[in-house]
Amino acid sequence: MTNNNTKPLHLPRRSRDVDESEWTEQKRRIPAAWHTIAERKGYRIDRRVRDKDHVALECHSCGAHTAHKVFTLRSARPACGGCREAQMRGNAAKAGFILVARDEEDRHYATYRLPCGHEARLQLGRLQLLATEGPAPDHDGFHCETCHQERLQQTAAKWGWRVVGPDLDGSANYRQLAHEACGFDQRVAIANLETGRFGCGGCGESWMTAESWVYLMRFGVPGLGGFIKLGYSRNPQSRLRYQLRLRSDVEAELIDEVPMPSGHVALRLEKALHRQLKADHADKVIPRAELTGWINVTSEIYAAEAEPVIRRMLDAIERPRWPRRAEP
């Protein structure tokens, strides 16, 4: 609320339900002892307000006016509403957000506008953490729930599914999905939704029966050199982006894909290729432990010198009716 000097009058949380009309100036004498106490605590008493028990304090630090009981002034250090609001707005700006409003029901929460334009109710402590870590529209431990749901819906649609609600067991790591092909509802982990590695419990459609790809990837690891990975996946691009959990300084690219009629066929062929490589080119097999912390590999990886050998093997198994999608 504002006073006759047009300065907002900040109110204590427990007094914010009092009608604005009751916070008018009271023409009462202000005892000299009150002024002394206020100065000692960083304030100037601007006027008496509402009734005989309240005063408007002007903060020496920010100039804001805050209403407090005289008892609070005498017995404690009154909190400045202006400084508090400035701190909240500053923390919001550091996190890349805009403070919309404090939560009148719970002083530990406030509503913020996110960089995407949506609003979210956040705990002040959580916002403080985001502020110390810098602008964070997609920060670890926080995301816009509206945007997150939209992304999950788009991902589900890519696989022929639809998100119909939260997990019935209450887990934040799962969602309830409906299969567009047959209408069957089931619980799916978000991690599996991202990669498409799940099947339908209704019609039996599965990633193991769907078309898959035997792929070849190339990696450049700082200080260690180049490596080649041979594997199979229903979605090699998703495999590269999500499952391998590459360090940010690892260079990676998908350099070849050979389509297979099903995951079963791709898995059987991949295992046969690995057996042949280990038998004929054991010196080019890289121990998985050597790349721990760089690439989350779950099957064999090879030295860069093995690329021509593996390319010839892929050429040998390629069929004319299965055109490649990636060029060398």
Image (spheres, rainbow, N blue to C red):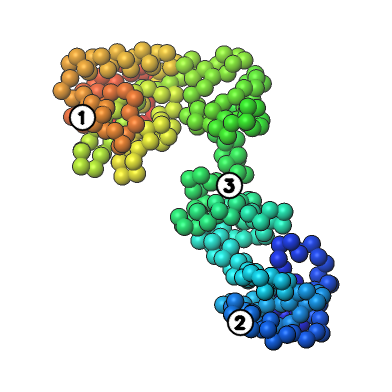
Residue 18 in which image quadrant: bottom right
Q: Considering the numbered disc 3 on the image, is that residue within a helix, a strand or a loop?
A: loop
Give the amino acid type for the residue marked by disc 3 in the picture.
Cys
- Across and down, in percent, residue 176 comes to 63, 28
Q: Nearer the viewer, mark 2 or mark 1?
A: 2
Of residue 325 and residue 270, the one placed in the foreground of this image is 270
Q: Is residue 258 above or below residue 45?
A: above
* Residue at image location 72% in from the left, 74% down from the top: 70
Tell me the residue at 18%/29% (across/down): 305
Report x, y in % for residue 31. 73, 85
Task: Residue 192: give x, y in percent of width and height.
Answer: 50, 27
The image quadrant that residue 285 belongs to is top left
Separation of marks 3 and 2 at Cα, in angstroms: 44 Å
Q: Tell me the element at label 1.
A: strand
CB within 8 Å, label 3 to label 2: no
Tell me which label, 3 or 2, sits earlier in the chain: 2
Quarter of the image with the N terminus in it: bottom right
Query: Position of 4 compared to 121: left or right?
Result: right
Q: CA distance from mark 1 to mark 3?
A: 42 Å
In the rendered image, which residue does mark 2 sit on?
A: 39
Element under disc 2: helix
What residue is pinned by disc 3?
144
Circle 3 Cα neighbour tier, 10 Å, few/some/many (<14 / 14–19 / ≥20): some
| Disc 1 residue type (three-letter) | Ala
Task: Decide which of tag 1 and tag 3 comes sooner along the chain.
Answer: 3
Residue 218 appears anywhere in the view: no
Mark 1 surroundings within 10 Å by alpha-carbon count, few (fewer than 14), some (14 through 19), many (20 or more): some
Residue farthest to the left? 283
Dot 2 or dot 1, earlier in sequence: 2
Pointer 1 residue? 303
**Residue type highlighted by circle 2:** Glu
